[in-house]
Image: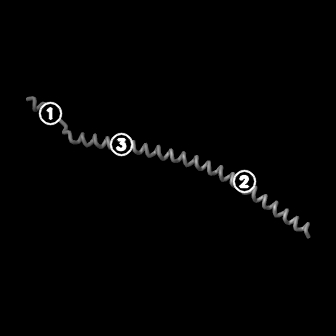
Amino acid sequence: MTENLLQKLEEKMMTLLSEVEDLRNEVQRLNQENSSLKMEKENHTKKVQDLISLLDAINVVENTASHLNHNMTTVKPVLLQDIQERAF
């Protein structure tokens, strides 16, 4: 009977050791995946920041162009005919 209990205990220990090893492997895999995801996040964050900077630059250019267009519309064009009429 004692031998039977020892055998069961040994089997249980082997099962537990196997589970511990599986869990260690899973932790290692998850740590690697986590590192990979962190790098991916950093890359995406940089791309988003670059895109925002580009959009800001476009906005500045559009605002400058809008102000230039506004200033140009306030200037009245002078026709050559008007200049000639004033000269005589």
The location of residue 30, given as percent across then percent down, is 66, 53
Report the amino acid beneath label 2: Asn
Kindly identify which residue carries mark 2. 25
Q: Please, which colouring scheme is shown? A: one colour
Q: Earlier in the sequence, mark 1 or mark 2?
A: 2
What's under tag 3, amino acid-wise?
Answer: Val
Quick one: label 3 or label 1, which is nearer the N terminus? Answer: 3
Q: Which mark is residue 71?
A: none
Q: Secondary structure at mark 3?
A: helix
| 6 shown above or below 73 | below
Residue hosting label 3: 60
Gap in angstroms between the C-alphas marked 3 and 2: 53 Å
Residue 35 horizontal/vertical position (percent): 62, 48
Residue 13, picture quadrant = bottom right
Q: Are marks 3 and 2 in contact (CB under 8 Å)?
A: no
- 59 or 12, which lies in front? 12
Q: Does residue 20 appear left or right of residue 53 in this picture?
A: right
2 with respect to 51 (left or right): right
Horizontal arrangement in the rendering, residue 72 relative to residue 63 (left or right): left
Q: Position of residue 43 (x, y in %)?
A: 54, 45
Q: Nearer the viewer, residue 58 or 83?
A: 58
Mark 3 vs mark 1: in front = 3
